[in-house]
Image (cartoon, rainbow, N blue to C red):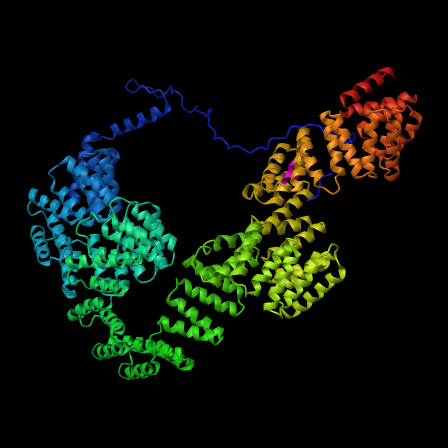
Amino acid sequence: MELLDLPARKHMKRLDARQSDTRRHPGKKKGRTNSSADHSFIQESPTMTTSCFPIRGFRTTILAALFFSALLTGCSKSPAELQKKYQGLGEHYLAEGKLNEAVIEFQNLLKINPKSAIGHYDLGQAYHKKGWIIESVIQDREATKLDPLMLPAHIALAEYAINSGQWSPAKDEIAAILKIDPRNAEGYALAGQRMLGLGREKEADQDLKHALSIKPGYARALVALGDLKRKQGQPKEARSYYKQALQANPSIGRALTGLGMLAQSENNSVLAREEFRKSLKVDPYNLRSRIVYANFLASGGHLHKAISALEAIPAKKSDVRIPVKIAEYETLLGENQKAINLLLPLAQQKLQIPDINFVLAKAYEQSGKKEDALQMVNGLLSMGSVPPIIKIGAARIELFEGKPQEASTILQSLAPVPDLPPTYPLTQSQVALALKRPDQAVSILTHALSRYPGNIDLQLSLADARMSAKQWKPALTIINEVLSDHPENIPAIQRKGFLLGKTSGASAQIGFLQREAASVPSVEPLYLQSLLANKRPGKALAAARGYLKDHPENTNVRLFLANIYLREGKLSEAKGTYKTILAADPKNLPAVLSLASIAMTQKNYTEAESNFRRALTLSPDNSGLYSALGEVLLAEKQRDAANKAFHSALIFNPENPAAILEVSKSEILSGQGQEALSRLSALLKSPLTKERKAEVEWLWGLANEQAGDPAKAKKALVLATSLDPGNPGYHASLGDFWADHSRWEDARNEYRKSLALQPDNPVLELKKTWLSVQSSRKPDPARIRKVIALAETYRATHPADISATMLEAQGELLLNKPEKALPLFDAILSSHPDNTGARLGKAGILLSQGKTEEAKNLGTTILADHPDNLAANLLMARIDQKNNDFTDEADRLEKLHQKHPDWIQPSLTLVAVDLKLKRFREAESIADSILSVKPGLYNARFLKAQAELDMADYRGALRNLSALAKANKKPAPLYLIMSVAAMKEGDTQEEKHALDKAFHAAPDDPMVLNNMAFFLASHTTHYAKALEYAKKAASIDKHPYIQDTVGYVLFRMGRFSQAQSYFESAWNAHFRDPEFLYHMGMNEWKIGQPQKARTILKRALDSGKLTPEEERDSRQALGAMGA
């Protein structure tokens, strides 16, 4: 930043105090109000007035004409009679099942009376029978708005809320029903269903039995009681209630659905299917029955059929339960993105349905999108009346995402809820183990087993808790109890094998698993694994081969065999075995991935790429697979394709460390430091290995350097070298940083460390030589040419490495050969079109060549990609300045300053531009903000002083200029400005003091001599000394303003004729400063040249820039000359 032009002397251009223009911000446009709207069409009509209908306006006329026309048609029925007619017809059609005709009649009714509550309710009933669920609900809601006491509409709304799991709205509707009719059986039955849905079984039982006491044999209550008993594991009582319901109403589908679910729980799938189909036949549009049937299909492993069964439901006959259930099935299939796409629009509608958030949370969790999953859980927990089972599921998500304390809080909120399922203590114990409280887990599970004796999941978890506390024998006792009742339970067999290894040694473990494998074939992989774990690979290999002779179809054992080959380094046998697996099972993902891994080991990147792409067809939303594909593509030098793969990895898991690092590297290489920062921030506090942590810090440093934050860059780069001191690249980057900040010795030290670790690195040798160029006081052409030669040689053998090309281009610029640098920048851009450094270098050359528009286009392109790029913003500011667009320049710099007030260079430039635009107050404010951070910054203080001078704050300017002068090795120009400020302040003593200091600092400076001469001639009688100084200045510099000073001193001495020659010399040099004109005009008058004197003095006066004293003297002289 260069200093602004310094005023040379007091009688140069005056420093007038000016008010700064307040920066204006366009206000919001006010909406127009059409106060003069044309109402001329509302006129009285002389032709349309009758005695029956006195009409005073056009609109009234139209209404009267229509009414009169209706009278003439012969329709004599009143609106009330028509309403009754349409309602009767609608109900008749509804009873006959003519639903379309019923809809038409009810719609006709509502045309006559839109506020008919019964009309809206009846239309809703017609829609409901057509299966148009949402339209039905809309009409029921309208009916209750118009008539809050309409009981049937409240019942319909309560049914819909319960069926769709909207427990809070259901509560409101049930409250309305029981307020209207405190002994309403339907209201209590619905209340019981709601309590059952919330898992509050005791209250559900009370409400349902109360409904039956009011209305014995009420089918809805009987079905709900059947559901309750089925959930409580009482099939006999459940079946009895369902059959009673069917006796009361043979066409009640939900009772048949309940019987189907009982059959399913008893593993009678044939009977279950029969009952479900009966249910769908008697009540084809009952969505609950359809969902139960879909669940039946899904439980049999037919997930795709289950989805198809639900997708077949027409949209108008569906409601929100259907997409939620389909999304749940998609998550079970691993199609998490499909589930997210299906449910996200519903979640954004803020529907109070916990299932939506729960299924979305599961989909996000399985996709690796931790933050999104937890956000959905938080949204779920903020809803009222969340069923306990969903809260338990939410706690499990928190637990699996590494937040056991949050999971514990959710579970504690369920403590007062009675009759919680076994999943509750199971999850509690898992949370306790995660919090390293095995004794608490044991206590929870022991208590749970007293309530649910024989529950296998609880028993296995209790064994796990004992094992966590290293209580091997008690754990073995529990496992033996499980195996006594369930001798083929694989998880129990696996645990017993492990415990025998702990209590009796490896031989006992291997022997037990071998015996079990003989009777339970699925145990074979466990037996083989135990051989391998106990360092008996030969025996494991033989056992696996032997087993496969008798069971060639067993894929798990064949996979195990292939893995043994791989572990033993027998890659050929491993590959052959994996290919055999894929021949029988083309979709076996572990086999495909193992083949890809082998190909990578053998550096057969083409085959590895092919296998990773095949794996992605089997698991298309797998973030890790995309990362692996990216690594292969990098090895194949397909950087663009690799970058796309890493970006895809981040779509499915934004926290994938490998993908973040690679994408960040690519962004930094392209100059996108700000974008890289936003990605890397996620890894800064992640638990990483020391080497990976060093890599993150290294990239964080490079990105911060690009983003204009050297303090953070330095800290990160230093940390990277300390975390991994053996990495030569980190030392080289830190050396680059020191070089960029002119800390040459520090840079040399880092380059030496890097070269010691990597002695044959030609780029480092190149950088060392370049450093000697940078650190020399004057450019050394010989050294620069050496750098260029070295870079050229390296570039010839490493065309893909742009670092040497960039140094070569910078060297050519230092040699003032932009025509040679330009092709080098173009070469970089041909292979790296987004490289910001090359773009900036090219733009700078174009600007220096006068190709402003081309430079501007490049700058605009950079800012479109990187709006915060400091160098690009400064380039555009230079272009604006070159085009004299100071306002645009200021706007650009102001936006940058507001966004990054800590960026010094653009802030300084903004101060300078504000001064040019005479926005002195703003300039001073920004300079102050810079000085608050960098109090010793010379240019900021100088610009602040300049702003103070322009605002006539001369004392402030003197303080700042004095501080600058003390710190400056050549303070004379600053003392000169101080003398001008003192003169403006009217402080002659301070003015003389400043001039003396200037003279002491630079006794031969023509400006100092000039101003000292002028002061002496104006304020003292030391004319001889003044003349000596003035003539000495004139001998050094022939500038007109010095000629003017010599003439002025002679004028003050009364030597007018001698003065004339100096004034004429300045005049002939086309010097027309108003103060000079005043001096020359007064002198012309004194030597008897009135005509010339009049012309010159009038011109001085017309400028409006004379001091009051000079203006007064000029007018007196003109008066004396008769002008």
Foreground of the two, 62 or 272: 272
Q: Position of residue 742 (x, y in %)?
A: 66, 54
Foreground of the two, 692 or 373: 692
**Residue 279 highlighted magenta (yes or no):** no
Q: Is residue 272 above or below residue 360?
A: below
Q: Position of residue 992 (x, y in %)?
A: 77, 29
Judged left or right of residue 901, residue 463 is left
Query: Residue, x 73% and y 24% (percent of image)?
Result: 986
- How many numbered discs, if any? 0
Judged left or right of residue 934, residue 481 is left
Observer able to see residue 1003: yes
Q: Is residue 925 above or below residue 353?
A: above
Observer able to see residue 107: no
Foreground of the two, 452 or 177: 452
Which quadrant of the rendered structure holds the N terminus? top right
Q: Is residue 471 above or below residue 742?
A: below
**Residue 911 highlighted magenta (yes or no):** yes
Image quadrant assignment for residue 1003: top right
Name the dominant secondary structure of the magenta segment: helix
Q: Position of residue 392 (x, y in %)?
A: 26, 53
Q: Is residue 530 above or below residue 970?
A: below
Q: What range is drawn magenta here? A: 910-914
Q: Position of residue 145 (x, y in %)?
A: 24, 35
Image quadrant assignment for residue 401: bottom left
